[in-house]
Image: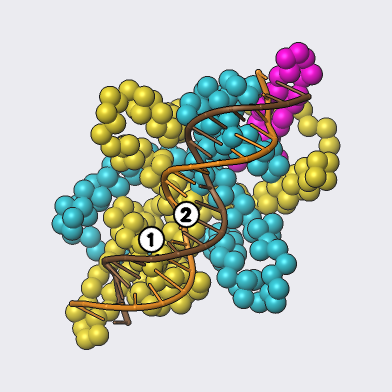
Chain colours: A yellow, B cyan, C brown, D orange
Amino acid sequence: MTREHPSNPVVLDATARQVLQVFSEKSTALFAPEAPVPDMDNCPVRDVLARVGDKWSLLILVTLSQKPHRFSALQRQVGDISKRMLTQSLRMLERDGLVSRQVFPTKPPSVEYALTALGEAALVPVAALLDWAAGAHDDIRAARRRYDAEAG
Amino acid sequence: MTREHPSNPVVLDATARQVLQVFSEKSTALFAPEAPVPDMDNCPVRDVLARVGDKWSLLILVTLSQKPHRFSALQRQVGDISKRMLTQSLRMLERDGLVSRQVFPTKPPSVEYALTALGEAALVPVAALLDWAAGAHDDIRAARRRYDAEAG
DNA sequence: CCGAATCCCAAAAGATACTG
DNA sequence: CAGTATCTTTTGGGATTCGG
């Protein structure tokens, strides 16, 4: 399988590329005299990738995409997540407007978490990425075997 | 802006959802008596998300999508990445078959990194995700302001 | 039942110095 | 130039305890 240089010129469109420039915070870090805030707030990609990349957020979003869940039900469904991380993850998702939190002042109280419209929209490109990942998995494993074989 | 429950039933297709089930390694962890390998190898999603989620891989892939780069050029382009992390990230990307590494035994030696066909293919769904992130950024920031305002 | 607060460990990643 | 080796700092995340 002799691999030639892929010469397709462009993969990313202009928007994506520009967005990724912002992904690196170097420029603002260099220009800021006192670096007021490492402005995570100004970078859309870091925002979204921070959620996609962490261990639990995606799993929570997917679970909620099936139906709204209460805290404990959510924990059981996800399985091996601690209350601490579940709370923490939910707070971040709620803060970003991807998940809604509604308290029912019953006794004992119950809290219901659900996806917002924004949260559902987020899952669309994420699902596309996962589909690609599923399809490319064999290629990746093959590449990995090759690599590990020739250079242990 | 009163937000009602989003009631669109399905966001993820079957493949994506099934794939995400595997994302959690709980089941295998529970069933394995001695847990031989936490089989990262058998989970396509963890594989790909591990790359997408970390700080540098995406930036490297995008930089390489413009043209092949040598090691130092790549480091300068990315900006604030250390040689250590650049090496480490490149090794993972190479191992997964997303990036190729070609050594020219000149003196001093030079090494050229480039995207493989698989690497370029990966950028397609990634770009879609980034586009969504760029579009949703305003909504996310707005949600964040609201959240921080009402519950400092 | 839902969560906040604290402690503590292990992994990730930056800084620095050295090598073929 | 293109890394490797080592050290230190930072972060993520589990366990436990407490409160509303």
Q: Secondary structure at mark 1?
A: helix
- Front-most of residues A15 and A73: A73
The numbered mark at residue A89 is 1
Specify the quadrant of the image occupied by residue B115: top right
Residue B4 located left or right of residue B121: left
Q: State which tag comes first along the sequence, 1 or 2.
A: 2
* Magenta part of the chain: B97-122
Q: Position of residue D4 (x, y in %)?
A: 70, 35
Residue at position x 70%, y 23% from top?
Answer: B111
| Quadrant where the image shows the C terminus of chain B | bottom left
Residue at position x 29%, y 63% from top?
Answer: A100
The numbered mark at residue A123 is none
Q: Chain of mark 1?
A: A
Tell me, yes or no, whether the two marked residues, 1 and 2, touch with CB atoms within 8 Å. yes
| Quadrant where the image shows the N terminus of chain B | bottom left
- Front-most of residues C5 and B73: C5
The numbered mark at residue A54 is 2
Amino acid type assigned to the residue bearing label 1 in the image? Ser
Find out whether residue B114 is within the magenta segment: yes
